[in-house]
Image (cartoon, helix red, strand yellow):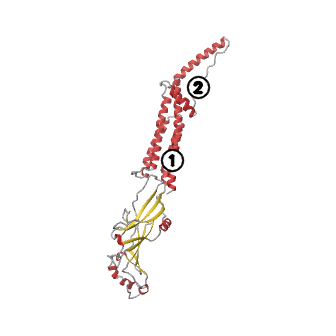
Amino acid sequence: MLSCSRPDTHSLLAALQPVFKLRPIRPVVNISTTTNVTIDFIMFGILGVYWKNEFVTWDPEECGARQITVPRKLLWVPDMVINEFMEKNSAPFVPYSYLYSDGLVLDAQPVRVVSSCRLDIYLFPFDIQNCSLSFNSYLHGSAMQLEILTSAEEIFRYSKEVMTTMGEWELIGLTAKKLEPTSTIDDSGHYVTVRRRATLYVVNLLIPSCFLITVDLFSFMLPPKDVDRSLFKMTLILGYTVFLIIMNDLLPITGETIPLLNVFLSLCLGLMVASLLETILITNLMCGSTHYSPVPRWIRVLVLQILGKLVRLPPNEAPEEKGPLCEDEALQELKNLSSDLQAVRLQVEQQLNGSPSSEEWIQVGSVIDRLLFILYILFITVSFITIIIIWVIFYNNP
């Protein structure tokens, strides 16, 4: 018990001088006594530490004060550290601590924590991460007993109130757990659950990719015989490649796990390349089949008759020839002359438009083009719906 000559601050400080000289040692009378250190913090960078100094106690009426602020360097302070600390604390230093008449010491230091956290980026940018903050004393080890002053629910509620930052992460959960002490270290930890704000990535990555893949999808409506569809698709692929290079900084650095977003972007690019290859094949069938041999019978049956009906492109039927009519000779001569003119016209059309086998190859190309267009729509729909469902399920169930 300290004895003050007068009930004023000067007398109290004079009585505390012997205590200040004991700063290098842990403030316990018996060295086997455990120092109980209570930690209080919020997810805003403030770290409050409480402990009992057994060397200090005084009568508030005799000394004239129940508490006093003293320079932090004059008192023993526990070496509290955050194990996940990655950078030097850049918060402003507070040189004072509160000292109470019952020996309680309050050391409230602002701490800006840049910590390490093992991230699971598979669901990026709709990922939810669980990080830990563990407190301990490396020097005193088991001689200190760590406790958490405020419940995890209260810390979470107050942290939500004071966190006004519009950063990338949103605090959605906080739990406290007493970690198992080792032979030399006793520590306590908090598990922080944060969710990434995905608006930036949706606007800058997902929506443009969906727009470009939609344009590529509707490019199937361009007639391959009249429009250079392949040039249009190559322009899309080039633009999408440049877009991915520019937006590469928004993507996370991948390790063992590939983010689902990378799969989505690669899928979009792969579909565009497959669409271009399909266009090259169809253009070759429709525009370069003049010198092709006649369509094999199995292709004619499979593509023109079976697949053609499936995609609603039935084969073209040749016009039926009508039998000769019983008419007078003059009319018959005119009909013979008309037949000769039709034969000449057919020969000219064959030279200009190709042979009947070329017409069949063109129809084969049309059937395959429509079939691949339908398969393209189905594949895009199933793939995108599957990816979206995975994102939604994990995003709404942290």
**Nearer the observer, 139 or 329:** 139
Element type where label 2 sits in the image: loop
Provide the secondary structure element on which disc 1 rests: helix
Q: Residue at x 52, y 47 (%)?
A: 385
Instruction: Give the class, few, some or many, for how many residues have Cα within 10 Å of label 1's Cα (few <14, many ≥20).
Output: few
- Sequence-earlier tag: 2 or 1: 2
Q: Quadrant of the N terminus?
A: bottom left
- 10 Å crowding of disc 2: few (<14), some (14-19), many (20+): few
Identify the residue at image location x=32%, y=79%: 22
Closer mark to the observer between disc 2 and disc 1: 1
Mark 1: which amino acid? Thr
Would you say the residues marked 2 and 1 are in contact, meaning their CB atoms lie under 8 Å apart? no
Q: Amino acid at mark 2?
A: Glu
**Mark 2 and mark 1: Cα distance apart in space:** 43 Å
Q: Residue 327 location, x and y as percent?
A: 67, 13
* Residue named by callout 1: 386
Figure label count = 2
Which residue in the structure is indicated by mark 2?
317
Residue 55 percent location from the top left of the image = 36, 80
Establish if 301 lies above or below 332: below
Q: Residue furthest top?
A: 329
Q: Nearer the viewer, residue 10 or 26?
A: 26
Q: Give residue 138's quadrant in the image.
A: bottom left
Q: Disc number at residue 265?
A: none
Q: Residue 201 location in percent, x, y?
A: 48, 52
- Image x and y of residue 339, in percent: 60, 17
